[in-house]
Every structure is written in structure tokens, then in C-alpha cells.
Amino acid sequence: MAVACVSAGLAATVGSLLLPRRYTSTSSILIEPPAGTDPRTLTAISPIYLESLKTYELLATSDSLFAKAAERFGLRRGADREPIETLKSRVLKATKPRDTKLLQISVTLEKPETSQAMAQFLAEETVRLSSELGQDAGKELIEEAQRQWNEMRTQLEAAESAHAKATRDIPVQSLEGEVESLLRLLGRVKRRQSTADAVVAEQVGLKGESAARARAGEFARQVRELEQQIAAKNRLLAERTARAEETKTRVDAAQTALAATAKRIQDLRASLGSSGDRLRVIDKGIVPERPSEPRTVLHATVAVGLALLGSMVYLSLGFSTKRRPS
């Protein structure tokens, strides 16, 4: 057992020492909530919010971003090019520690300077991509609001044109003047009718009674005609006034909707860039001085453990065989 353990430990140690040294550098990103968020709301939803931040791991380890970094730092040069998926699983690791707002990006390479530079590059690119995604979402909202504003502006112009046409084609003021003139004329005719009725009353049984009654009847007829004309003018005036008020109401509604959409566009532009989470690189990482791989102590410990276990199993089987009766 001793020989097996020592031999396994030495073999694992020598094998680890023969492997190329690889260095790991880690950059850290702080994920902050959107600007202007109520702290009480964050406290209430903190477990869910913190769990949702794990999506940034996917952003930091996206294939397109890693391929860009691999091309930038020359990880796939030469004829024997390693598949990008295999290379990424061996080189890159992004984790969000539980119950924290930190995202850690680790890069493991044979050159310590390259591992630090690549980790910093991936962290900065992750921050940039997150900001661009937030701005793109805000720009889409602004473009949609701008499209609605253009439509409402067209509707307002159409409503203003309809109101101007209604005001021009429906001369309400002139019609009101005609009604006032008819009312004044009706007043004069009624006064004459009253005078004629008084004359008829005075000449009852006299020679001029029939002529007086004829004049009174004529005034009564004029009164009826004037009242009919005034009623017709009033109905027409009411219709025209209603049409003018309807077009004016449409103009007012279109102006209100246009102003509300313009205010929304202004608010969206003011909040652009602060509507999503804010990512900030708080640790660019350092150039590692000690290799992270190969893990000689770990390899030797595992080898000794396996040798010890194997020796015990071997000896147990040997003793069991010897103890069997012949």
C-alpha cells in the first residue's frame, strides 16, 4: 500500500509538473439597479432581482463576444485551430456569486498578461453591450412614440382643416345676424298688429271695420311667416353651431393627444440610458503571478487517495481468496 501510494503520488506530481502552466485572471463587474429606482421596491424584490442578474452570465459568455476576444488575442492562430466551443469551455468562466450584485469573468491562459488583458476586455465589452441593449430598447420606444406623434400630427392637421372649412362654409355669425334682423322685424310687425287690433276693436259696427280687420289679418299673417322663418333659421343655426363645435372638439382632442405624445417622447429621451441595470467594471483584474493550473497538490492528493483505495480493495480481495476452504 505504501509503495502504491508513493508511486501514484510521484507519478501525479511529475505529470503535473510536465503540463504547461496556465494562469487565471478575474475581472469583476458591479450590477447596479436603474437610476431613480425606489430603494424600498428593491428591498421588497431583492431575492428575485438578484436571481434575475444571472442572465448577465449569458451575455458575458456569448459565443460572438468570445469569438471576438479570441480573434483579438490570437487564441486560434495556426493551422490546428481548436473548435471555438471547446476553447471557450477551457478558457472562459463567468459566475455571479449567490446573493450578490457582482459578475466575475475569469480567463485562463498560458500567458498571464494575456489572461488579464482578455478578462478586462470581456468585462468592458459586457458593460458596453449591456448599455447598447438598453439604449436600443429605449430607441425602439422613442421611434414608436415618434411614429404615433407623426400620425397624431396628421390627424390634427386634418381636424384643423375640417374646422376651418366648417367655419368658412357655415357662416354662423351671418346667420345669427339674420335671426336678429327677423326678430326686430317681428317686433315691429307685432306692434303694428296690436295697433290694428285696437283699431278693429274701436270700429266694431262702423263703416271701416272690414278694412281694419283686413289690415289686422295681414299683420297676423306676417307675424306667422316671420315666426316660421325665425324657427327655421334657429334650427339651421343650431345645426351649424353643432357642426362647428364638433370640429372644434376634434381639434382640441387631437392637440391634447399630440401634446401628451410629445411629453412621452421627451420623458423617454430623458430616461434613455438609465432605464436598465447599470454595469460598471470595479476590478480589471491583475496579472497573476502564480499558475492556477496544473494543480499539482490536488492531483497528487487524488492519485494517492485512489492508490490507497485500490490497494485496500486489492488486499481485501486477496485475503478473501486465501480464507476460502479448499
Image: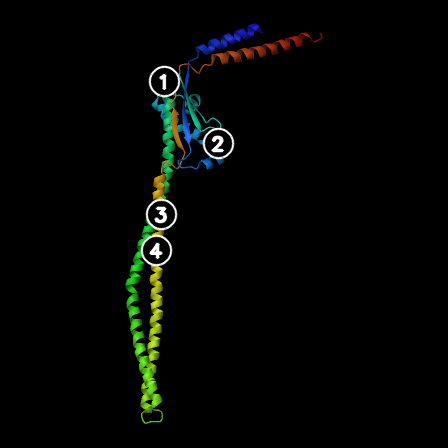
Q: Amino acid at mark 4?
A: Asp
Q: Please name the residue shown 36% across and 30% down the image.
A: 128
The quarter of the displayed image where residue 60 is located: top left
Residue at the disc numbered 1: 113
Residue ID at (34%, 69%):
236
Residue holding disc 3: 261
Q: Residues within 10 Å of mark 3 (few under 14, many from 20)?
A: some
Determine the CA span between mark 1 and mark 2: 33 Å
Residue 5 left/right relative to 149: right
Q: Sequence-wise, which precedes: disc 1 or disc 4?
A: 1
Q: CA distance from mark 2 to mark 4?
A: 48 Å
Which of label 3 and label 1 is nearer to you?
Answer: 3
Q: Secondary structure at mark 4?
A: helix
The amino acid sitting under disc 2 is Glu
- Which label's residue is closer to the chain start, 2 or 3? 2
Q: In terms of depth relative to the viewer, which is nearer, 107 or 252?
A: 252
Query: For mark 2, what is the residue?
Result: 51
Real-space Cα distance between discs 3 and 1? 53 Å
Q: Earlier in the sequence, mark 4 or mark 3?
A: 4
Residue 62 visible in this rendered orientation of the protein: no
How many angstroms separate mark 1 from mark 4 (CA)?
Answer: 67 Å
**Residue at numbered disc 4:** 252
SS state under label 3: helix
- Hey, what amino acid is under mark 3? Thr
